Amino acid sequence: MNYQKIINSLGIILMIIGISMVFPLLWSLYYGDSDCRAFFLSSCITLFVGFVSYKDTEAEGNIQNKEAFCIVVMGWLLASCFGTLPYLLSGTFSSFADAFFETMSGFTTTGASVLSNIEGLPHGVLFWRSFTHWLGGMGIIVLFVALLSSLGTGGAQMFRAESPGPVSEKIKPRISETAKILWYTYLMLTILETILLCLFGMPLFDALCHTFGTLATGGFSTKNASVGYYSSPGIEWVIIIFMFLSGANFALHYHAFRAKSLKGYWRNSEFKVYSCIILIVIVLITFNINTDGYKSLGESIRGAAFQVVSIITTTGYATVDFDRWSSLSKAILITLMFIGGCAGSTGGSIKVGRILVLLKQTKLELQRSLHPRAILNMKIDRKNINDGVVVNILQFFFIYIAIGLAGTIFMASLGLDLVTAFTSVAATLGNVGPGMGLVGPTQNYAFIPDVGKYVLSFFMLLGRLELYTVLVLFLPSFWRK
Amino acid sequence: MNYQKIINSLGIILMIIGISMVFPLLWSLYYGDSDCRAFFLSSCITLFVGFVSYKDTEAEGNIQNKEAFCIVVMGWLLASCFGTLPYLLSGTFSSFADAFFETMSGFTTTGASVLSNIEGLPHGVLFWRSFTHWLGGMGIIVLFVALLSSLGTGGAQMFRAESPGPVSEKIKPRISETAKILWYTYLMLTILETILLCLFGMPLFDALCHTFGTLATGGFSTKNASVGYYSSPGIEWVIIIFMFLSGANFALHYHAFRAKSLKGYWRNSEFKVYSCIILIVIVLITFNINTDGYKSLGESIRGAAFQVVSIITTTGYATVDFDRWSSLSKAILITLMFIGGCAGSTGGSIKVGRILVLLKQTKLELQRSLHPRAILNMKIDRKNINDGVVVNILQFFFIYIAIGLAGTIFMASLGLDLVTAFTSVAATLGNVGPGMGLVGPTQNYAFIPDVGKYVLSFFMLLGRLELYTVLVLFLPSFWRK
């Protein structure tokens, strides 16, 4: 491995993070809050370290496979370390564990928080929390690849290592073009949702923060009661629709926009399955909660739709305390935590596309046990899915569940009850945010011991980078020459 | 499909069940209990239906793949239906759902019960409950194959469809010889444990019933407090050792007995992993429960060892109420429910051998993402594991977890809390028996609505026949000519 190349790239990533800190600084200055000094300092420190690390050589070209994995994982870890500076310097957190948890939760778009009183925070800090969602949602590395067009094949490898889903789609032959298009689409949807939220009466600052939380499927809010604070059906429906869009493949949005036609959506099996699951579950839960004190059917539908879309897209916003729903609704929501959004979306967890392959493969495997000599191939959207991809997805499922179980045992060893332990792991590994029990939607993660916070932060990173990218670094052969 | 062939085989299976009912009848006569009429009638009815179905043609030879699946699944269903007769005729149960649940739980060696007062039952019924374990443990079909040597290749297919583990080992080239050897080994261990239990002061009747429950990894006891009733360290250690042996591959026991050497055990990776998991978990739980009111370290070790071996082998006997242990110990026990015994054992669940392949494959898949072009093969015990087997095992894991989640949602829809719903499914699908919460070791399954009992009975069968055998019957192509 060429360490200079890695350090170079990490330097650029840090400079991107440093520049990002200017936006909360501006809000802080606008509101005249006390945290502007913290943001100025944080930005300077991050930019300085980034600048010192970066040596202007041709080194960023031709990044090898191993180096790509290193850059992506180290880039995310460094971003989360330097991202804590505003929290620590402004005094929002006194402990590094808390600040690291909150930053990692932000960048990985998990949205799990250790804060109990959010409304008491200065504007700069609130903006930074939501802005980390936005940066991490489409991806720090995708942004890095979009900005640097000289990365060659290394760019494609890094892009693949960060982007969600089993196979990453190339919109354009050049990976930096693809990355640019994805970021433009993301930006346009951001502007659109902000305008809509403002039209429904949300102040601009809140609208921006909630847009970041929605489009990145993050879940940080500027209010203690999350989106429930506004008690506005209009705002809730806007957020439901944009959560739904953010859980779908962004390449589909781009194609629909280019072709000015919605046909592309219905030609995509993953999108169809994603929509069907959401519709069916909304109907089920609407009937299930309709007796639980909801006033009208309309309210029940909205309550069910909001929570269902929020959980399956792994956003984690809440308008009601779903931990008080019946165990049927809770069991369904926990299952949704393991499904997640579509490939190429900003959603986390296993992804609908993988579930689709797993279900089709189940049928194939049963046929195989009936006709051992038959040659059976899988097709999705008229494309053959080769065996290597299928095995990779099956294996992904096993690792995901195995980590989930091991994580539950670890969290239980810290004294958490079974439901809290299990859902805290499911909600961080799936980048959802709130779980059930003591980490339910009206609770927070503050009470968890520091070691638990670090482990859950690691799960967030594992989930966001879809296991393999992080786990290969633990292979002894990775570090051998 | 040749339906006459299927009906023929089912007739023989029913006759086996009918003859088996003579044993509880004898105990009933010996004790002069009121249930002897019930057993006499049940045996006659079952034998008569079996005899009428059986037509002495050459039809049992050359059974095809589809027919084999049909015979195995229908055989198990019929055995469980006719097995309810003694319960219903003796008045032990008034509802068919309860009787079917108890019989299926017996044959599949699950050991989940709907009875609250076991000690009040007549001896014949108690014996029949435990005897169903013993028949189902080594396998009704294996017994059928052992008794009929004229089955040809169909026998091997049925053997495979019933026997646990990803690849069934042939001890002898002829499948009926293999089946005979397995049943002899099983019988010898049965005699040995019964003698040992008697030596430690257990009455012969109880010793036989508990031996059936142990060797089949079943879990039905003749006492309300399960093995805890005897409060005898000697009895507990005998049962711990025999549960441990029953969770290991019976082919290994046979080879060890033939070669008069224990070397074969240590050459078997699965057995080594199985032993290591048990040892590590016993140590962990001993330390975890040592503060929970246990008097001495020895008692803690025994308590931990009994419960750990009972759960991983999917037996389900209990000497303490593990539902009152800390959430760490409970989380570990739930994880063990998903591991289960070894291939070729009488234990249920996923099996250590499959877990071993899944873990090795995880490493291979990570190496593959690092070196996409490398050719990597898996070896276990110096044998190559081909890709088809690996995919089959990965797929098995997915189906197992997917059914577990869907089952949890279904059980939650009946109003069960999350922990009860989840563990009731895990404990029946894994053929364990007791779960946590309302189905914990001191509770029973009586309160579950009838539809829930049928679904859980179906899960027991799915688990015992390792998913594929049952699920292929749901393929539309199975029924096409």
Image (cartoon, coloured by chain):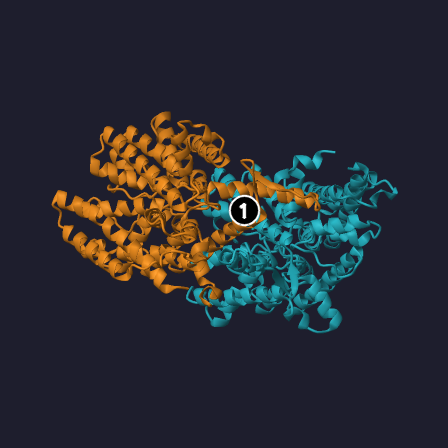
Chain colours: A orange, B cyan
Q: Nearer the viewer, residue B427 or B40?
A: B427
Q: Is residue A183 left or right of residue B462?
A: left
| Mark 1 neighbour density, 10 Å: few (under 14) some (14–19) many (20 or more) | many
Quadrant (top left, top right, bottom left, bottom right) of the C terminus of chain B: top right
Quadrant in the picture for residue B187 = bottom right
Q: Residue furthest front?
A: A58
User: Which one is in front, B300 or B227?
Assistant: B300
Residue A456 drawn at (x, y percent) = 37, 55
Q: Could one spot residue B102 in this view of the protein? A: no
Say which of A202 and B124 sits in front: A202
Q: Position of residue B82 (x, y in %)?
A: 72, 42
Name above or below for residue A451 compared with residue B160: below
Q: Is residue B52 left or right of residue B457?
A: right
Residue annotated with mark 1? B425
Left or right side of A387 for B179: right
Query: In x, y percent, where is residue B277?
Result: 54, 64
Assign the N terminus of chain B to one quadrant of the image. top right
